[in-house]
Image (cartoon, rainbow, N blue to C red):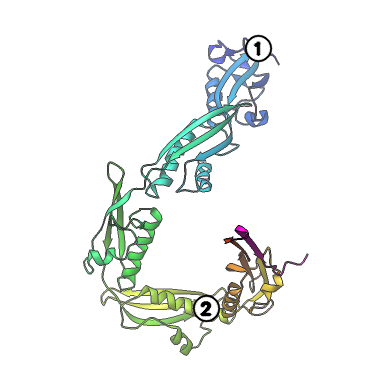
Amino acid sequence: MAPLAGLLFLVPALAHAFVISDIKVEGLRTVTPSTLFTYVPYKVGENFTAQDSTQVIDSLYKTGFFSNVTVGQVGNVLMIQVQERPTISAIEVKGNKKVETEKLQKALKDIGLSQGHLLDPQALDKMKTELQRVYYSLGQYGVQIETSVKPLDDNRVFVLIDIYEGKPASIRQVRIVGNHDFSESQLLGELSMHPTSWWEFWSSADQYSKEKMSADLESLRAFYLNRGYLKFAVDSSQVTITPDRKQIDVVINISEGPRYKVSDVRFSGNLLLDKATLEQLDQVKKDAYFNRKEIIDTSDAISKRLGNDGYALARVQPMPKIDEENKTVAVDFNIQPGDRVTVRHVEFTGNFNTNEDVYRREMRQMEGSWYAADKLDRSKERLQRLPSVQKVDQSVKPVPGVADQVDVDYDITEQLSGSFTAGVGYSQSEGVLFNLGLNQSIPNRRAI
């Protein structure tokens, strides 16, 4: 095909319509012709006028693949010339210390800015906004972000993101508004975020983050809900930064609501446990103020007790019934034990140095036997006590398609079992002496 330069006449200059005998494209590098043709709203054999060129150009621009599109005509052939956006060969982020590179890369990928993607200039602007959002959530309001794009061969580019994090803004003041039954100082004592004195240089309590704010709001909720304020609410929380971006003021608006007492405690559903057992597990005190912690502890105790009998997927849902006139609440624990299940498989992962048999010897929950929560707890404790184990994560997973079986997985984090020693001494006959020692115990290795 002859090059378009010198042959291409812009369609808007056409004086008459023509019937498309063929469609030819020039300038493609990574986008295939078949992909491009799916976005061209015209086919061979259809009429084409000067006004139709705008629709072709708009359709191709909307794909995001191209930075320039030109439409023209050679005879009855519709000619399309495109310039693809460059492909991102690599993205380097430097200067970030507060935020892991992986987290930043994920934030960039969410807006379409990652290795192998086409570079959209608008995405660079979005990138700055997104990275600022990540840093602002950590109280890093002084962050500065600079980007540079270096062209490479084959229509590729290298993107460099240089971050100056600056100093985190410190909390100047925290206020709680709307409290009546408790003093502001008492409520502030429940929060982890607060201003610090000049001599508390080691403390990070004056550093704001969204995670810390969420945790503090939950602490306030727990404080009130454990004291009978069943309808307590956080109405709003405002974070204001000073003009110099160095200090933050936090205001939390709350509604305490009325205080409720427990009028009755009931149990409904499939009661596999007798009344005496349920009353023994019940931690909710009748005629005392409502306490969310006691509700949760009772639900957990019943679930665990059912788990000891093989009901691994038991659900205990507390259902409060409020009497507004008397300001009381009756709590009904609805119990749904589900099916009694057996343990199909017990699996271990992460044991790179130790033979699996070493871990299986510590198990008190056997494969093929009824699920028992107390045996699983003891099994985890015994695994954790092994000298080769640093951490144990236990998870119970239902077997797909089988209602009465579960698998138990243990993710083992092993710790180094060796030791290294070094020393320096002096002898009148030998002079300065150095000694090094390496002791590596040989664990029970996996069978080969």
Q: Is residue 349 left or right of residue 377?
A: right
- The residue that disc 2 covers is 304
Residue 183 position within the rendered picture, expressed as x and y whole percent measured from the top left: 22, 66
Of the residues tagged 1 and 2, which is closer to the observer? 2
The reply to whether the magenta stretch includes residue 339 is no
Q: Is residue 381 left or right of residue 209?
A: right
Q: Of 408 and 427, which appears nearest the observer?
A: 427
Residues at discs 1 and 2 in contact (Cβ within 8 Å): no
Where does the magenta region start and end?
Answer: 428-448
Q: Residue 75 — which label?
A: 1
SS category of the residue bearing label 2: helix
SS category of the residue bearing label 1: loop
Residue 283 position within the rendered picture, expressed as x and y whole percent measured from the top left: 40, 81
Residue 431 position within the rendered picture, expressed as x and y whole percent measured from the top left: 60, 57
Q: Is residue 276 left or right of residue 311?
A: left
Mark 1 is surrounded, within 10 Å at the Cα level, by few (under 14), some (14 to 19) or many (20 or more) other residues, namely few
What residue sits 35% from the left and 53% below the top?
A: 207
Identify the residue at the far bottom of this view: 276
Mark 2 is surrounded, within 10 Å at the Cα level, by few (under 14), some (14 to 19) or many (20 or more) other residues, namely some
Identify the residue at the far right of this view: 448
Q: Quadrant of residue 367?
A: bottom right
What residue sits 46% from the left and 76% below the top?
A: 299
Q: Of 415 and 246, which appears nearest the observer?
A: 415
Q: Quadrant of residue 322?
A: bottom left
The reply to whether the magenta stretch includes residue 443 is yes
Q: Of 57 and 168, which appears nearest the observer?
A: 168
Q: How many marks?
A: 2
Q: Which residue type does callout 1 highlight? A: Gly
What residue sits 24% from the left and 64% below the top?
A: 185
Q: Quadrant of residue 38?
A: top right
